[in-house]
Image: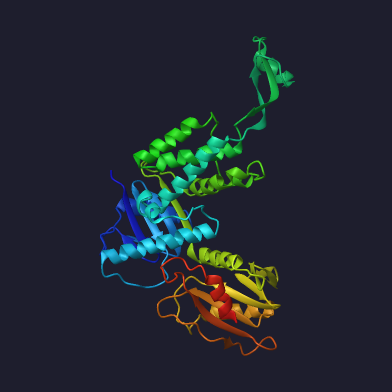
Amino acid sequence: MSRQTIQIFEHERLTTYPDEWGRKITPRQLELLCLYNDNNQNKYYTVIRNGVKFNQYVGVIQIGNLTIEILPKADKTNFSTLNDKEVEIYRWRKVLLKMLQVCGIIKVEAPSEANLKKRHNSLLDLYFDIYLNEIESLLRSGLIKKYRTQSNNVYALKGQLKFSQNIQQNLIHQERFFTEHQTYNYQNLLNQILIKGLRVLKSIANDTLLIDRINRVLFCFPEIEEILITESNFSKVNINRQTEKYSEALKVAKMIILNYSPDIIYGQENMLALLFNMNDLWEKFIFRMLKRGEDGTYTANYHQTQNFWLNRRIEPDIVIVKEGITYIVDTKWKIVSPNNPSDNDLKQMYAYNMYWDAPKSMLLYPKTSNAIDSDFGKFHKGREGENLCKVGFVNVFDNNNQLNQKISAEIIEKLN
């Protein structure tokens, strides 16, 4: 069966009937999407009649031979031609990759035009490529060996003899000894996580070249006992100077292993979903860009907290301190009218102003074609002096349709 890739934007629909661009899924694929969403608190998309409507989660889903790539989009542009749509898909795919890179979620080395257009049919292919590159690099530099305690029968006495077990197992085999001893080999959690990630990749790969590459990497691995890998295993990993070289591979392995759903019902279409909440990604991206832009005139702080009510706490996205004055920035990945923020958002900003003694705060949204910043509006009660909030919009793209690298300077200017 041939591979199929569907590229779609957040908040669009995908059903078992073809849309105007010919995109559709089969009833079986819809069934698996529903099952996956049920197992994840129905947060990734909304099930509708004969299909799904995607929410604010972006990324990639693979079901058997089908790959669904969900891309962000900060405007409501309609497309008149397929070429226009493909240009927009390519543009937003580059932005998503750059955001993931800036936020430290994925290691992408300045993806080139050829890289994006030819090497990878989907974002998932890019993840696989990164993971295999990291493991091949580790194999070249040498996997880490560690000491571990082992208990078994040996033919030469070493370590500590376990008398009771030796009597039970070796009463008629006096040439053997049951001992507890230390061995120095590749059998450790780091390598077990890596090989588990490779096994998952092999189970969902549907490209012969990719499968061949995975097999070659597995062939180079030393013999390692495979174990069940869960989230608790990753919390036990200790990254230090010796194991630092594993950090990128472990990061991708965690995403692959923990988001893998083997098809236990039919045993045919395994599923892998790597999805990111666009609200969280936008928030982290804005903060990282502000940190990059720090020039000595301001500092940006992420998720400061204060006690709010009883055991509840209050936590703005970003707190900026400039020349001794505090400003609050709260990011929102959605389309709004410039002078019509929600009451809940305004009440939230009022509380931030009060608790951080900030004269100004800003609700920050991605800029759409007709979006214009509002003026600072005044809260009628509260702190002495200024108590203001505004709605601000920042360009995701620059004039060359690349990711805007001047976002930090634009944000600081909007607060002045």
Task: Give the image location of residue 44, x and y in percent.
Answer: 45, 60
Q: Is residue 285 above or below residue 268?
A: below
Q: Is residue 218 above or below residue 163?
A: below
Judge left or right: residue 188 versus residue 107.
right
Task: Give the image location of residue 322, x and y in percent.
Answer: 66, 76
Judge left or right: residue 371 versus residue 147.
left
In this view, the residue in front, 289 or 371, is: 289
In this view, the residue in front, 274 or 227, is: 274
Q: For the point 60% across and 32% down, which residue is it?
A: 187
Task: Give the image location of residue 84, x and y in percent.
Answer: 30, 66
Judge left or right: residue 20 versus residue 315.
left
Point out the image quarter for the N terminus: top left
Task: Give the image location of residue 315, x and y in percent.
Answer: 63, 70
What is the number of callouts on the image? 0
Q: For the point 41% across and 53% down, which residue is it?
A: 123
Q: Is residue 177 above or below residue 293?
A: above
Regarding residue 149, the answer to whether it shows in the image is yes
Point out the image quarter for the C terminus: bottom right
In this view, the residue in front, 246 or 309, is: 246
Q: Report the coloring of the rendering.
A: rainbow
Q: For the point 58% across and 46% down, which residue is it?
A: 247
Regarding residue 309, the answer to whether it shows in the image is no
